[in-house]
Amino acid sequence: MTPIERHHALERIWGTGPGLQRLSAVNHTIMGRRFMIAALVFFAIGGILAMLIRTQLASAESPFMEAETYAQVFTMHGVVMMFLFAIPFFEGLAMYLLPKMLGARDMAFPRLSAYGFWCYAFGGATLVVALLLGVAPNAGWFLYPPLSSATFTPGIQSDIWLLGITFVEISAMSAAVEIVVTILKLRGAGMSLDRLPIFAWYMLIVGGMMLVGFPPLILGSLLLEAERAFGLPFFDPLRGGDPLLWQHLFWLFGHPEVYIIFLPAAGVLSTVIPVFSGTQLAGYRVVVAALVAMAFLSFGLWVHHMYTTGIPHLSLSFFSISSALVALPTAVQVFAWLGTMGTGRPRLSIPMLHVFGFFFVFVCGGLSGVMLAMVPFDMQVHDTHFVVAHLHYVLVGGFVFPMMAGAYYWLPHICGRMPVHQMSQAAFWTIFAGFNLTFLHMHLTGLLGMTRRSYRYSDPLWEVLNLVSSIGGFVTTIGFALLALDLVLLMRFGRPFRRNPWGAGTLEWTTPTPPPSYAFGAIPVIDRRADRLEVERMGADLAAGRGLLATPRGELETLGVDPITGAPRQIIFLPHPTYLPLWSALATMGVFAGMLFKVYPLAIAFAALTVGLLLCWTRGRKAPGVLDAGMGLSLPQHRSSDDPPSLWAIRLLVVADATAFASLLFGAGFLWMSAPGWPPEDPVRIGGILALPFLANAALMVLARGWAAVALQAAVLAGLAAALMRVGDATAHAAPATVMAVLSFAAVHAGIGLILGAVALRGFGRDGAIAATWHRYAGLSGMLAALFPPALSLLTGAPA
Amino acid sequence: MRVLIALLGGFLVWSAAFLALYATQATGCSLGWPRGVLRAVLIAMLAGFALLSLVPLALARRSADPFLRRTATLTGIAASAAVALCFSGILWMAPC
C-alpha cells in the first residue's frame, strides 16, 4: 500500500463528514481546535468587560455605569476569564497536541471530548446571554455568601453562576479523565514514563490536580444552590450554617486552580525554550520532581485567601509556610528554563519574545505572591488592588504570555503556514507595555487602600493612578487586537512549509501539516526520550507505514500500552463520529434549565433522558479477541484485555467522587465545630433504619458482581429512602441539612450503582469490572454515610 | 507500581499530615482541650508523620528504573523537608 493509498483509506475511516455532519465530530484535532477557538471568543468578551471596568475607574465619581451594572461586569470578567477562557483553552491545546505528541491517533474517549465541548459551549453561552439580558451574576467571581444567598441576591443571578459553572465544570472533569487516561494508556510503542515528552508530564500532573481540585467547587455549588432553592441552611449563620464553609470549599478549588492554569503554560515553556535554544531541557528529572511537589503543595494554600477570617495563628502558620514553600518548585522550573537557555544558543524568534515577556511579568507576580503569603503583609493589603495586580501578573504572566508563545509555535502545525513576523513584534511590545502600565500602578492604588470591586472613589491621587491604569488597559487591548490580526494574517497568508519548521524533536511534527484526522499513518515505535526524535526520518517512515497498525481494517484503531514501560498491551477501538454527545449535552442543559427556572419535574425528566442517552454510548460490538498489530505483533482488542481504558476512567472518577465526599464530610465537621448555633435545639434522630443500608453496603464490598450487587444496591436505596423520610425539617438547622446531604449523596451513588449493575448483567466485555469498581467504592462511602447521622448525634450530645 | 507510590508517597504523607494536624488542632481548640495535652498530641503526630515521610525514600532506593528512582528520591527528600518546615510551628506557637 502506497502512502497516498494509506492516507485515503485512513481518512475514510477517521474523517468527519462535511456540512451538518461536522456536529457529529469526535476527533481530537477538531475538538481541540473548537475548544481553543471558543475560549478565544470568550477571552475577547472578557477583554471587552475589562475595558468597561477600566472606563468606569478612569475618573473619580464616574457616571459611566451604575453600581449594579458594574457588579455584573466585574463578576463576569472574572468568571469568563477563569472558567470560560483559561481552563478550556489549555484543555483544547491538550486535546489537539497530546495524541500527536504521544504517538496515538486520538484521545482515549473521543465522545467524552465532544460531550465536554458542548457542555462548555452551552454553559458559557448561558452566562453570556444572562449578561446581555442584565441578569448576570453580580456577587463577585468568588460568589461569597451571604451576599450571594437568597436573602441578598433573590433573583436568578447567583443561580446562573452556580448552575452555569457546574454545567461548564462537566467539561473540565471529563477533560481531566481524558487527559490522564490518554497519557497513561495511549502512547507509541516503547514510550515508557521516562521517555514522555515533558509537556505530557505537565498535563498528567494537571489532569490529576483537576480530578481532586474541582469536586470541592462542584460540591459547594450544589450545597449553595440547595440553600437557595430549598432553604437547606449550609451557609446561613442564623440556622447553624456558616458562610466561611463556602470560602473553604471555594478556595480548596480556587488556589490549586491557579497552578492548574499555570502548569500547562509551563509545559509549553518547557517544550518551546529547548527548541529555540537548540538544546535539551536542563534538569528534566528535577523538573518532574518539582511538578509533583507543586501539585501537592498547591493544595495546602487555600486558607491564604482567608487570613483575615480569624483562624488561629498555628494553623495560619501551616498555610503561610506552604504558600512560601510552593515558590521553590516554581523557582526550580524557572532556573531550569534559564539553564536551558544558558547552555544553548537562544534564537529570538517571536515565540521566544513572548517567553521573555513571561519571565519578566511572571517573576514579578511570583514575588508579590511571596509577599502576600506573609500573614502581616496580607492583613494590610487584603482585598485591595494590590491583590488584583498580583493575580493579573501571575495569570497573564504565567498563562497568557506562554500561551501566546505556544500559539506562534504550534499555529504552523495547525494551519500549515509560518508567521511572517511583520506585525508580531509590534503586537508583543504593545501588549507588554500596556500590561505593565495597567497593573504596575495597581500595586500602588492597593497600597494606598483602594479596595477591589470599588466602583467609585474620590481621592485625587487614586484618580491619577487609575487614569494611568486605564490608559494602559486600552494600550493592552490595542496590542491584543494587533495580535489577533497578525494570527489571522498568518493563517491566511503565511509562508507554507513542508515539515518541522523549528527543528523540534517531538512527535507532533512528524505528522503532515495541517494534520490529517488519523494523525499517524502508522503508530510509532519509540527508542529514546520523545523530545529527542529524528522528526524528518520518522515522518517519512510513519507515512510509509513503517510502524504498528499500519494496515487499515475499517475500525478506528490505536495502540494501548503498559503505563510504566510503554510495552504494547492492546489495540484500542475508538468510536466513529456520532451525534450522541450533542444530544446528551442538550439533555444535560435541560436538567440545568429546569433547575434554574425551578421547574423540577422538567429537570427530573431531562435527567432521565440524559442517563438514557449516556447509556446508549455503552452499546458496542462483541470483542473480536486477538488481532494482528503489524511488525509481527498480535494484541488483544481492548474489550478483551485486562485493563481497558474504561476501567482506568472509572478508577479516576472514583478518586474525584471520593474527593467530593471527603469535602462533604469536612464541611459537616467544620459546621459542627465552628458554626454558630450548634448544637441544634432539635437533634437529628433517625433510629435503627440505617442498619439496613450499612449492612447492605458492607455486603456490597464483597458481593460486587451480578444479581447480588443489583439486589444489594436496591436494598441500600430503599433503606436510605426510609432514613431520608425520618430526617425531619432540614430547613430548620444545618444539622439535619448535612444529614440529608450525606444520605442523599449515598442514595445517588446507590442509584448509579443500580444502573451500572443492570448494564453489567448483559455480561458484555469489561462492564462487570467497571460496575464492580463502582459497587465497592459506593459500598465503602455508603457505610461511612450510614454511620454519619449517629456520629453527628453523638458529637452534638444527643442520642441517635 | 511501587516506584509510582514512592514518587507520590512523600507528598501523600505531607497531605495526610496537613489534614490530620489541621483537623486535630481545630478540634482540640474547639473542644477546649488543655493547651499542654493538645501540643503533646500534635507533636506526637508530627513525629509519626516525619518518620512516615521517610518510607517513600526507602521504597525509591529499591527501584530498578534509574529515572524513576532518582526522581522519586528527589520528591521524597522535598516532601520530608516540607513536613518538617510546614508544621514546625507546633513546637513553638500557641496551639489556639
Image (cartoon, rainbow, N blue to C red):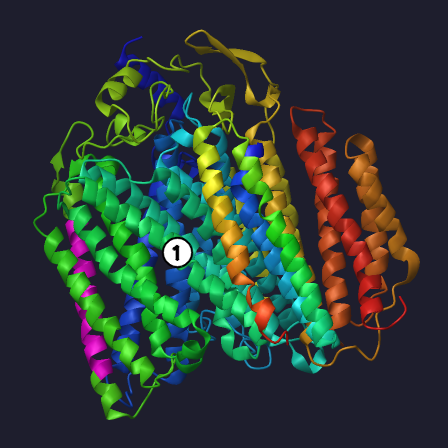
| Residue A155 image point, x, y percent | 54, 76
A551 left or right of A321? left
Name the residue tied to disc 1: A328
Image quarter of residue A443? bottom left
Q: Which amino acid lies under the numbered mark 1 shown in the image of this protein?
A: Leu
- Pick the front one: A190 or A114: A190
Residue A472 falls within the magenta-colored stretch: yes
| Residue A186 image point, x, y percent | 46, 28
A210 left or right of A600? left
Q: Residue at x 76, y 58 (%)?
A: A743
Magenta segment, prevailing SS (helix, strand or loop) = helix
Which SS class for mark 1?
helix
A550 left or right of A726? left
Image quarter of residue B16? bottom right
Quarter of the rendering occupied by the C terminus of chain B: bottom right
Q: Residue at x 73, y 70 (%)?
A: B37
Q: Residue at x 29, y 90 (%)?
A: A61
What residue range appears in magenta?
A465-487
| Residue A428 image point, x, y percent | 16, 57
Q: Is residue A421 above or below residue A498?
A: below
- Pick the front one: A239 or A308: A308
Q: Is residue A77 visible?
A: no
Residue A281 falls within the magenta-colored stretch: no
The crowding category of the residue bearing disc 1, from other C-alpha atoms within 10 Å (few below 14, some 14 to 19, many at least 20), is some
| Residue A655 image point, x, y percent | 61, 46
Q: Is residue A713 visible?
A: yes
